Amino acid sequence: MHNRSIIETEFKFSDGDQPGTFEGYGSIFGNVDSHGDVVVKGAFRDTLRDWKNKGKLPKMLLQHGMGFSNSDLLPIGKWDHMEEDEKGLFVRGHLFGMQSETGQRVYEAMKAGELDQMSIGYKALDFSLGKKPSEPYRTLKKVDLWEVSVVTFASNQLASISSVKSEAGEMTIREMERALCNGTLPPLSRTEAKALVAGGFKTMKSERDAPDDGDELAEFIRRNINILKT
């Protein structure tokens, strides 16, 4: 019997060298999904070892490939790294066809935070059934993992994409403005932080006596400057 567990966590486009690289968690340990299943640490250990022995990793699909044509089963990218850590199944991969219509639509939806969840497709090999209403329906101890999908809707509310590297490899001014406003600026290198702080203070100083739209951005920087402190 094949199963799918959809979970919502943070995933993000990462600062890797390849545009469209992102990372996050395909599964979170100890969290009961909407199907009543919970995955425990160690459930992926054997299947990841088996994939490693084959020199491959599970497929990356969109919506589990559940579309109306054979092309929907084509991978949208490739998983480059998977491992169990204390939190769950950590995954890192990259998108295919960033210049194609499909690749660009997937990338833009992920970057905008609308396509922000992940789901695993697997076969349960070892599990126990709950005996009380308060217990999970199944506690998954060992699974055969065959794909990790990027999906729109989740059943486990804890696993999602935490970062995505932009196609240009850098944040746009608009993205920086939004991140400063929302307090969601990603980690910066020391050089980047110093450059932004220096530029921000110069902007605030020069704009104090000339109130216009620049003051709004300067205020964003002033309110969020603590994010840049190391």
Image (tube, helix red, strand yellow):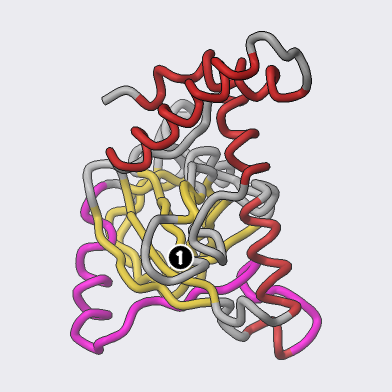
Q: Is residue 67 above or below residue 188?
A: below
Q: Is residue 191 left or right of residue 78?
A: left
Looking at the picture, tell me which residue is in the foreground, 153 or 41: 153
> Which residue corresponds to the image point at 36% horizontal and 46% vertical from the top-left?
139
Q: Residue 211, how many percent across, how many down? A: 75, 13
The magenta span reads: 41-69
Residue 89 is left or right of residue 111, and the answer is: left
Label 1: which residue? 21
Give the total number of marks visible in the rendering.
1
From the top left corner, tell me how far across and down residue 141 is, in percent: 28, 54
User: Furthest residue to the top?
Assistant: 209
Q: Is residue 46 magenta?
A: yes
The image quarter in which residue 198 lies: top left
Count neighbours of disc 1 (C-alpha within 10 A) and say few if under 14, some if 14 to 19, many if 20 or more: many
Question: Is residue 166 shown left or right of residue 198?
Answer: right
Q: Nearer the viewer, residue 162 or 154?
A: 162
Q: Is residue 132 above or below residue 116?
A: above
Q: Looking at this view, is 53 or 174 the one in front?
A: 174
Residue drawn at point x = 40 percent, y = 73 percent? 79
Which of the 4 image quadrants contains residue 58?
Answer: bottom left
Question: Could you say where residue 62 lies in the image, as x and y percent from the top left?
Answer: 63, 70
In the picture, the quarter occupied by the C terminus is top left
- Give the vertical position of 88 relative to 55 (above or below): above
What residue is at 36 percent from the left and 48 percent from the top? 39
Residue drawn at 40 percent across, 44 percent down: 38
Amino acid type for the residue under numbered disc 1:
Thr
Q: Does dot 1 land on a helix, a strand or a loop?
A: strand
Give coordinates of residue 75: x percent, y percent: 56, 81
> Is 75 part of what is drawn in magenta?
no
